[in-house]
Amino acid sequence: MLKISNVTRRFGDKVAVDGVTLEIAKGQMVGIIGRSGAGKSTLLRMINRLTDVSEGTIACQGQAVSELNGPALRNWQRDCAMIFQQFNLVPRLDVITNVMLGRLNQRNTLMSMLNLFPRQDILRAIEILERLGIEEHGPKRAEALSGGQQQRVGIARALMQDPRIILADEPIASLDPMNAQVVMDTLRRIHDEDGRLVICNLHTLDTARRYCDRVIGMRAGKIVFDGRAEELTTAVAREIYGADADFSEEATSTSIETLSRPRGAATRRPELVD
Ligand SMILES: Nc1ncnc2c1ncn2[C@@H]1O[C@H](COP(=O)(O)OP(=O)(O)OP(=O)(O)O)[C@@H](O)[C@H]1O
Ligand SMILES: [Mg+2]
């Protein structure tokens, strides 16, 4: 579905992404891991065209994404929704309006600013909030929600665009383990139930192993691992993180693993976490 060919991105002298070639098909949830500065965000941002490539090409189903501009670029950005670590909601606006802003690209800006949303958009936003289990928060200001709830609003806003691809840049980095799990479960469900391609930048090995089918490891702008989650051994992790013999997995761990349970099982209460 996505074909990334020999893509490089430079910022001045700094090479953030260095000759990356990748093919990503639908049907596998993809995690990108690597230490800070490895180039994970830059890679996602080039796919979405928030950042342009310096060299190389990115194509999706035969369309040269890296060449698009004007309305075709806006269509691509709608088709390829981003979810951010810091949620990027409008804090003072209510949740339902935040979700409907996901349609902004497709609608008249003035109408959106005046909060004049078509009934069908309102109904769709409510339906998505229900699906993500946060409909009761619809009328509240976004800033009144917990981090995990706000990130689910971020996901709802992305779904409002009905994207083919969801790019999540460290979606759980600001969350506690309990909320992190709810958000990752939500992304996995969207992948499984909707058949959307989900690519997720993650700081931690255990989350990547647990939720992703395919894991890509980046180091200094290059891909140093690309395989199934089960192949992500401690030795491989050492290579990705560039750590020496005293490398310990805990150093890259959120304590999400302490909540370990089969996918889809009932959620445990936060006070039960060690
Ligand atoms: N807009 C920019 N201007 C200058 N340098 C940049 C810019 N964006 C990224 N870089 C540099 O490119 C390199 C890769 O950055 P990137 O944000 O892609 O890493 P990352 O893997 O997402 O790191 P983190 O885990 O900290 O989010 C870093 O050295 C960073 O300083
Ligand atoms: Mg980043």
Image (tube, rainbow, N blue to C red):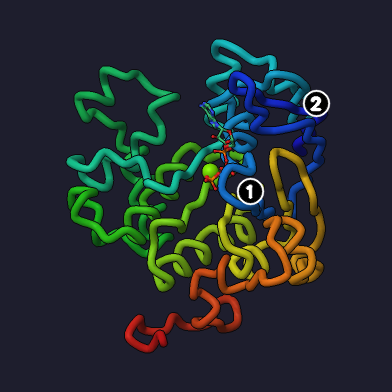
Q: Residues within 10 Å of mark 2 (few under 14, many from 20)?
A: few
Name the quadrant of the C terminus.
Answer: bottom left
Quarter occupied by residue 272: bottom left
Q: Which numbered tag is attached to residue 73? A: none
Q: Please give left or right for residue 227 compared with residue 261 in the image.
A: right
Looking at the picture, does residue 141 appear above or below residue 67? below
Q: Nearer the viewer, residue 149 or 10?
A: 10
Residue at the location (36% across, 61% down)?
148
Residue at the location (62% across, 29% down)?
46
Quarter occupied by residue 96: top left
Q: Please give left or right for residue 16 compared with residue 235 in the image.
A: left
Quarter occupied by residue 3: top right
Residue at the location (76% across, 58% down)?
239
Secondary element under disc 2, as helix, strand or loop, is: loop
Q: Nearer the viewer, mark 1 or mark 2?
A: 1
Looking at the picture, does residue 23 appear above or below residue 31? above
User: Label 2: which residue?
Assistant: 62
Q: Amino acid at mark 1?
A: Ile
N-terminal label among 1 and 2: 2
Looking at the picture, does residue 48 appear above or below residue 245? above
Tell me where residue 226 appears, x and y as whole percent: 80, 53
Q: Nearer the viewer, residue 207 or 252?
A: 252
User: Label 1: which residue?
Assistant: 199
Q: Nearer the viewer, residue 8 or 115?
A: 8
Q: Amino acid at mark 2?
A: Gly
Most extreme residue toward the top is 70
Tell me where residue 22 appears, x and y as whole percent: 80, 40
Tell me where residue 88 appears, x and y as whole percent: 35, 40
Question: How many numbered callouts?
Answer: 2
Q: Please give left or right for residue 74 compared with residue 106 in the image.
A: right
> Mark 2 vs ligand 1: CB under 8 Å?
no
Secondary element under disc 1, as helix, strand or loop, is: strand
